[in-house]
Image (cartoon, rainbow, N blue to C red):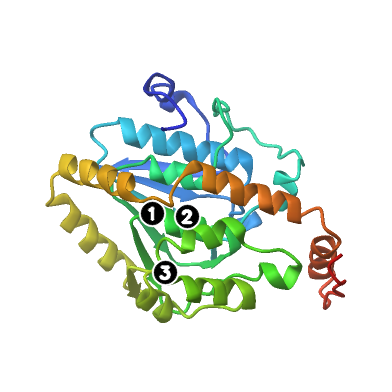
Amino acid sequence: MLYYSKEETQAYDSHHFAFLKLKEENNVFYVTLNNPAKKNALSPPLLNELAYAFSYAAYKGSIHMLVLQAEGNVFCAGADLKAFAGAVIESDSTIPKPAKEVTIGEIFTSFHKPSIARVEGDVYAGGFLLLCGVRFVMAQNGIKLGLPEVKRGLFPFQVMAALNEVMPARKVLDWCVRGYNLPVEEAATLGLVTQVIREGKMDEAMNALIAELKENSPTAMRMGIAAYEQIKKSASPEEHALMKGSLMQLLQTPNAMEGLTAFREKRKPNWKDDE
């Protein structure tokens, strides 16, 4: 289910988006994460805007596909943990809150048109929920793909669940537990990245993919993607909610607090034994 009704998205032109830049051109809807000062960190207000934009694109017949991209040299640094812990994010966004809390996974599983991530900046932590959600990931060679949570006393629960849908399970666990940067070429071999693009060639590669998709029936693609989601057993809202709950529980532990403090203070954390 989409987070907003068709009637609610008809007010699209009257709304102000604080965290996104949006453009519709030649049957393509461009959604740009536009908070580079915060490394495009995911916060509840940003997720509401994403959910609204995706709902609008899903309902509008003239939109055949969606491109997700980002301003700045970091595509997405993951979740804004202060925001999810209850800190108020001040913004002039006019997007109404949906009837239920937004989870990233459901934004994408409910969107049944081709979606492409244009990734020209680094991706960390919860940012991989965006890459796992889209249907195509076009990533520039040389960017960093990192899961550093465990080094800060956290664990990428939701990311692990999402990565398990597109990558081999043992590699996912290895990545999550060790917390290293995964080379882009290896990410392509493992299924996370669709195509690795040389620097300066992204426009050419994106134009080629969009042109190829435009040759196909938008109805057939939409119905095919919907069927694909129906046969995926693990992509349920309940699982994503469970993983988010695990993260919220972990955030309250001493080692999580120590890890985040050490990161802010640019020192090595002093881990405590689990009780």
Could you tell me which secondary element the residue under label 3 belongs to?
loop
Q: The C terminus is located in which quarter?
A: bottom right
Please tell me whether mark 1 or mark 3 is closer to you in this view: 3
Q: What amino acid is found at the position of numbered circle 2 in the picture? A: Leu
Residue occupied by mark 3:
167
Is residue 12 found left or right of 46 in the rendered image?
left
Could you tell me which secondary element the residue under label 2 belongs to?
helix
Q: What amino acid is found at the position of numbered circle 1 in the picture? A: Val
Residue occupied by mark 1:
134
Q: The N terminus is located in which quarter?
A: top left
Q: What amino acid is found at the position of numbered circle 3 in the picture? A: Met
Residue occupied by mark 2:
130
**Is residue 82 placed above or below 93 in the rendered structure?**
below
Q: Residue at 45% x, 42% y: name it.
A: 107
Q: Position of residue 90 (x, y in %)?
A: 71, 37
Q: Position of residue 118 (x, y in %)?
A: 39, 61
Asked if the residues shown at circle 1 and circle 2 are in contact, with their CB atoms under 8 angstroms apart, the answer is yes
- Mark 1 surroundings: few (<14), some (14-19) or many (≥20) residues within 10 A: many
- Mark 2 surroundings: few (<14), some (14-19) or many (≥20) residues within 10 A: many
Q: CA distance from mark 1 to mark 3?
A: 14 Å
Q: Residue at 51% x, 44% y: name it.
A: 20
Q: Residue at 23% x, 56% y: name it.
A: 210
